[in-house]
Image (cartoon, rainbow, N blue to C red):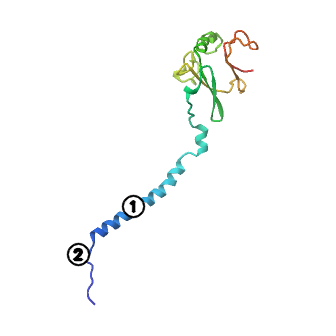
């Protein structure tokens, strides 16, 4: 038998590069396919995202003087596009408020520590649950409603 020792003279470099490239592509695809479910398992579920996710609302679609209700974390959130008259009437209610400038509590963010309690005065955005009894007050924007009283300047009424 003739000595058939391996020599580097008969190596096809083009074939070798092709095999290395193919193995790299297949290996990379395998790593990506394995990594995808691992990464997805670390993301919050649809239910978790819905429970605390931000709610996006098109405020321009809300006409002045109207109320829009959206749900956030299972609670109603009211958005009112206040009219200039509504904004002017806020000053008339100052004496009825315990903390008119919202400075006594650390719960108010700095941008809401003003007479409008808002970053943009024309929009009021609040969680629609009464802090008194946990009920859902009704939106009564009419001024001087007969069943509420002549000193009613509009707003949310808790029966």
Residue at the bottom extreme? 1
Q: Is residue 112 above or below residue 43?
A: above
How many numbered markers are drawn? 2
2 horizontally vs 78: left or right = left
Residue at the right extreme? 147
C-alpha gap between disc 1 and disc 2: 28 Å
User: Quick one: quadrant of the C terminus?
Assistant: top right
Q: Nearer the viewer, residue 124 or 83?
A: 83
Name the residue that disc number 1 marks.
25
At horizontal 58% and vertical 21% (from top left) the residue drawn is 105
At horizontal 48% and vertical 57% (from top left) the residue drawn is 33
Name the residue that disc number 2 marks.
9
Q: Is residue 114 above or below residue 25?
A: above
User: Quick one: quadrant of the N terminus?
Assistant: bottom left
Q: Is residue 32 above or below residue 71?
A: below
Snapshot quadrant of residue 92: top right
At horizontal 72% and vertical 9% (from top left) the residue drawn is 150
Q: Nearer the viewer, residue 107 or 115?
A: 115
At horizontal 66% and vertical 32% (from top left) the residue drawn is 75
Tag 2's secondary structure? helix
Residue 144 image offset from top left, x and y in percent = 70, 11
**Residue 123: mark:** none
Is there a contact, CB below 8 Å, between mark 1 and mark 2? Answer: no
The disc, 1 or 2, on the residue closer to the chain's N-terminal end is 2
92 horizontally vs 148: left or right = left
Tag 1's secondary structure? helix
Q: Dot 1, crowdedness within 10 Å: few (<14), some or many (≥20)?
A: few
Residue 76 image offset from top left, x and y in percent = 65, 30
Residue 95 image offset from top left, x and y in percent = 64, 10
Residue at the left extreme? 9
113 horizontally vs 97: left or right = left
């Amino acid at each position: 038998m003739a000595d058939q020792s391996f020599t580097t003279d008969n190596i096809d470099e083009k074939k070798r590069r092709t095999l290395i490239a193919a193995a790299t592509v297949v290996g990379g695809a395998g790593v990506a396919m394995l990594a995808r479910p691992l990464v997805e398992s670390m993301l919050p579920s649809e239910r978790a995202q819905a429970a605390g996710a931000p709610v996006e609302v098109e405020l321009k679609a809300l006409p002045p003087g109207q109320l829009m209700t959206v749900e956030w974390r299972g609670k109603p959130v009211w958005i009112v596009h206040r009219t200039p008259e509504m904004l002017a009437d806020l000053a008339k209610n100052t004496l009825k408020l315990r903390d008119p400038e919202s400075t006594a509590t650390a719960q108010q963010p700095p941008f809401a520590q003003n007479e409008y309690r808002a970053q943009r005065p024309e929009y009021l955005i609040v969680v629609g649950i009464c802090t008194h009894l946990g009920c859902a007050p009704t939106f009564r924007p009419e001024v001087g409603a007969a069943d509420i009283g002549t000193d009613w300047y509009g707003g949310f009424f808790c029966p």
